[in-house]
């Protein structure tokens, strides 16, 4: 019979972590859960709660791989398995003293209703404290992905796959995009230096800064004045790949929450920019972001619509299509994707991307450019999607991206997640020639 956790006030912190992870296993996104649950956790415990939830998710399949051989028979109990992963994560990947990690996690398994099985949790965690180095070695060796995803990546990236899997287990750096309308990157770095905040300039993005220490975003200089946004370095390349948008009619087709919309408006003054997305709630964040960044909005139209069917009677000069995708390139920032994404989702996502591409292509002016972007590292959503599109559209021609970054594909360029740098992104530029 399925057991439901007791109200969070009766649970210790580890049990609250486990109950959050159980909800992710049932298909809920971590961002939504954290939004509600962090408020229920006393402020002094929030950082640890956050670290244990994200860290365990980051190592999820690696922890699973090292746990299975330790069990005499399968547990068939998600709660106790999750307690084990949270316990092992603490023992193997954090500086939490082993005795505290073990006793709190064993108590959590009891609080969650599994007194009888708490002995197994205790025994395995004690063994991990005795054989820490060996356990850590096995954890490091494990690819840490669901097997369907590992197989796909191995097929797509045979040379890079081992490094790629290790990269995906890391935490991504916090990266800012400086709002050039108000302050230059060097001037902003000087402001950070003056406050003893360690940071350095990005190598690929000319407007990016990588933070070298954890910081509270809203307390950084110029947050209220709109001097910067938080945005991955590889996502910042989008605005460098579009043609000059000044005085042109532009569509940002899947715009919410507006990271790329804002960057385009920081760099250009289009005659009109349509920010379209099907998610009204997420679209609210586009206007909030533009407002904080103090970007003029008189030429911006924010529209809730389905990009597979939306039509306009004004032909567009440029379309940025940051397409819905598997988000496999941003697993470092959203480790719950490991559990949430299913193999069967991929074909559906590819079909949706194809439909959006086909519909939007009809709205583009002859001579206009479509920039196709995903945060996926699967070729089927990227290179293959573009091979199919170009084969089916005789009026489409690729404009090669000449760059030193990323991996050149048959069409477009692929960036893989890189240590201390950006996430997995794909870009391909297509011109409408007739
Ligand atoms: C990768 S996110 C966009 C991120 C955004 N461009 C940014 O830089 O902040 C993809 C977006 O596609 C939207 N989307 C998914 N299916 C859509 C559809 N059929 N029509 C319009 N938008 C869609 C989602 O709501 C989501 O906001």
Image (cartoon, grey):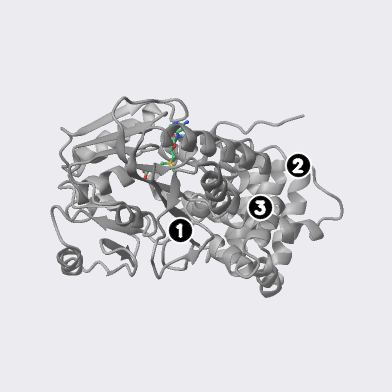
In the foreground, 248 or 63: 248
Q: Quadrant of ligand 1?
A: top left
Identify residue for label 2: 77
Q: Between marks 1 and 3, how big is the CA–CA gap?
A: 17 Å
Figure quadrant of residue 125: bottom right
Q: Of the numbered discs in the image, which one, if any, rests on residue 423?
A: 1
Disc 3 and disc 2 in contact, CB within 8 angstroms: no
Which part of the image, by quadrant, shows the N terminus? Answer: top right
Disc 2 and disc 1 in contact, CB within 8 angstroms: no
Q: Position of residue 81 (x, y in %)?
A: 71, 48
| Mark positioned earlier in the residue sequence (2 or 1) | 2
**Res. 98 in view:** no
In the foreground, 225 or 208: 208
Q: Position of residue 238 (x, y in %)?
A: 35, 53
Q: Residues within 10 Å of mark 1 (few under 14, many from 20)?
A: many
Q: Helix, strand or loop at disc 2?
A: loop
Q: Residues within 10 Å of mark 2 (few under 14, many from 20)?
A: few
In the foreground, 25 or 404: 404
Residue positioned 62% across, 42% down in the render:
346
Question: Which one is in front in this view, the residue at disc 3 or the one at disc 2?
Answer: 3
**Residue at the bottom extreme of this rendering:** 133
Identify residue for label 3: 149
Residue positioned 71% across, 72% down in the render:
131
Please, is residue 342 above or below residue 229 in the view?
Answer: above
| Mark positioned earlier in the residue sequence (3 or 2) | 2
Q: Of the numbered discs in the image, which one, if any, rests on residue 131?
A: none
């Amino acid at each position: 019979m399925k057991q439901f956790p007791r109200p969070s006030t009766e649970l210790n912190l580890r049990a609250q972590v486990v109950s959050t992870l159980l909800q992710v296993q049932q298909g809920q996104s971590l961002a939504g859960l954290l939004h509600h649950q962090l408020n229920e956790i006393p402020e002094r415990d929030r950082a640890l709660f956050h670290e244990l939830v994200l860290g365990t998710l980051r190592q999820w399949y690696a922890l699973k791989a090292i746990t299975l051989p330790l069990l005499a028979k399968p547990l068939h109990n998600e709660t106790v398995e999750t307690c084990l992963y949270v316990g092992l994560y603490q023992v193997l990947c954090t500086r939490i003293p082993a005795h505290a990690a073990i006793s709190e996690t064993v108590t959590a398994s009891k609080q969650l209703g599994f007194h009888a099985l708490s002995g197994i949790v205790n025994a395995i965690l004690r063994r991990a404290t005795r054989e820490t180095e060996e356990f850590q070695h096995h954890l490091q060796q494990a690819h840490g992905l669901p097997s369907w995803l590992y197989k796909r990546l191995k097929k797509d990236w045979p040379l890079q796959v081992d490094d790629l899997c290790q990269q995906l287990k890391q935490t991504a750096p916090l990266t800012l995009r400086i709002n050039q309308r108000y302050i230059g990157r060097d001037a902003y770095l000087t402001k950070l230096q003056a406050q003893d905040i360690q940071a350095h300039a990005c190598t690929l993005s000319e407007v990016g800064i990588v933070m070298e220490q954890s910081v509270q975003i809203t307390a950084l200089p110029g947050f209220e004045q709109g001097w910067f946004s938080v945005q991955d370095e590889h996502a910042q390349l989008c605005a460098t790949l579009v043609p000059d948008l000044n005085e042109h009619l532009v569509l940002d087709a899947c715009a919410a929450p507006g990271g790329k919309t804002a960057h385009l408006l920081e760099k250009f003054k289009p005659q009109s920019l349509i920010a379209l997305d099907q998610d009204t709630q997420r679209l609210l964040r586009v206007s909030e972001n533009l407002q904080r960044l103090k970007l003029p909005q008189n030429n911006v139209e924010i529209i809730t619509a389905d990009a597979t069917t939306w039509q306009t009677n004004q032909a567009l000069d440029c379309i940025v299509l940051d397409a819905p995708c598997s988000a496999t390139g941003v697993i470092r920032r959203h480790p719950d994707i490991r559990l949430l994404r299913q193999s069967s989702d991929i074909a559906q996502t590819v079909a949706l991307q194809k439909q959006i591409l086909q519909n939007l292509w009809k709205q583009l002016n002859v001579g206009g450019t479509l920039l196709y972007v995903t945060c996926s590292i699967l070729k089927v959503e990227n290179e293959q999607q573009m091979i199919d599109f170009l084969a089916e559209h005789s009026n489409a021609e690729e404009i090669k991206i000449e760059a030193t970054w990323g991996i050149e594909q048959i069409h477009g360029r692929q960036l893989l997640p890189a240590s201390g740098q950006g996430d997995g992104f794909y870009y391909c530029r297509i011109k409408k020639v007739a």
